Amino acid sequence: MYRHILISGGAGFVGSNLAIAFKREFPGTSVTALDNLKRRGSELALRRLISAGVNYHHGDIRNPEDIAEVGSFELLIECSAEASVHSGYESSPSYLLNTNLVGTIHCLEAARQFSADVIFLSTSRVYPIALLRDLPLEIKAQRFDIPERQSGKGWSNHGISESFSLDGARSLYGATKLASELLLTEYNEMYKLRTIVNRCGVLAGPWQMGKVDQGFVALWAARHLYEGELSYIGFGGNGHQVRDVLHVADLYELLKLQIKQIDVANRRTFNVGGGRENSVSLAELTQLCETHTGHCLKFGRDDRTREADVPWYVTDNSEVLAEFGWRPQYTIESMLKEVFVWLADNRTELEPILRA
């Protein structure tokens, strides 16, 4: 294992959970979490990081000097991002561009200085919106789905694979992530950095401060438990949209396998998600939350579809399964069970953040 791991975005949901997991399993490894604490709930993650023995460094990847202050490291896990696909549509994209693109450049420059390995957490939203909307979907019970016998290049009933076309617009968020992927390829070629790209779908688990446009599993659970408000937005306003969901602990297990076989994973791009077995529509998630809590909310409905929304995205995990023998261990139900326990145990702190 590496002597020093730097995790950018280390106080965010994904970064903090990865940092704590690495420190817990490899106590002899120095783990540093770099974060600007901009996201709500970051102060709760900071407390957990310090308690776990993770080094916290307050900084912003938009400022290369902040990264330089960390000193040398052997592995960079790049988790930092303005993570909303809707960023830039109704306001300036400046923070998005400077964080997701310029910030990545600063991280890569630091990695180049120390010849560090780089794992970049990209996103499924690199795939074009129009192409995802054009998939031949049908309504089955409470969800959109692709008919079993239909398929095309990079798509099928099993999900979206790495060969799905990248030709088209994808939102500025998706564009910054795809541009960052291209930069990783160039740094790999020019400077011989070992790099891995994981295009992650929806991630979930305890300590996620869910919002309407990100972290919807935690948001749905919190609003049901705390009896807040929710709405179905777009595609008819019936909650038929489908995503697959991956527990952050399953992502951690994959990263360990990739690190162990880094020469196999080097310069590769993988689609990573919960897969079809762990896919859920909003309407189905509502039913699961009602079963857990006994609370039935009155839903708002808005059939107007937002610019960046897509009706169906499920990850085809075939490539990571073939290369690493990895498959998710958490189900939607087991994820929800964990999240509800977390929400109940920390209600005093979490309800003001997640109920409104």
Image (cartoon, rainbow, N blue to C red):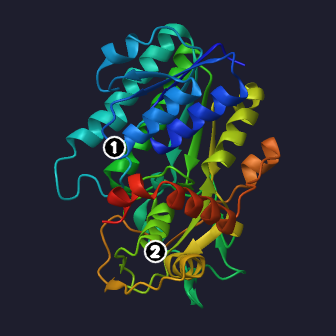
Residue 299, image quadrant? bottom left
Determine the image quadrant of residue 205.
bottom right
- Identify the residue at image location x=32%, y=58%: 352
- Residue type highlighted by circle 1: Arg
Q: Nearer the viewer, residue 100 or 20?
A: 20
In the image, taking residue 180 as reference, residue 246 lies left or right, namely: right
Residue 153 in sight: no
Instruction: Give the label on residue 224, or none.
Output: 2
Q: Amino acid at mark 2?
A: His
Q: Give coordinates of residue 55: x percent, y percent.
A: 50, 20
- Closest to the observer, 44 or 155: 44
Vertically, is 270 above or below 313? above
Q: At 72% across and 41% down in the image, what residue appears?
A: 253
- Is residue 180 positioned above or below 5 on the image? below
Q: Residue at x 50, y 68 (%)?
A: 221
Q: How many marks overall?
A: 2
Return the x and y of residue 169 as percentages of the image width and height: 36, 57
Q: Position of residue 278 (x, y in %)?
A: 67, 66
The label nearer to you, 2 versus 1, is: 2
- The answer to whether residue 94 is left or right of residue 143 is left
Mark 2: which secondary structure? helix
Query: Disc number at residue 39?
Result: 1
Disc 2/disc 1 C-alpha distance (Å)? 23 Å
Which one is in front, 327 or 57? 57
Residue 302, placed above or below residue 71: below
SS state under label 1:
loop
Q: Quadrant of the N terminus?
A: top right
Which numbered circle lies on residue 279? none
Neighbourhood count class around disc 2 (C-alpha, 10 Å): few under 14, some 14–19, many 20 upward: many
**Quarter of the image where the C terminus is located:** bottom left
Name the residue furthest left. 91
Q: Mark 2 or 1 closer to N-term?
A: 1
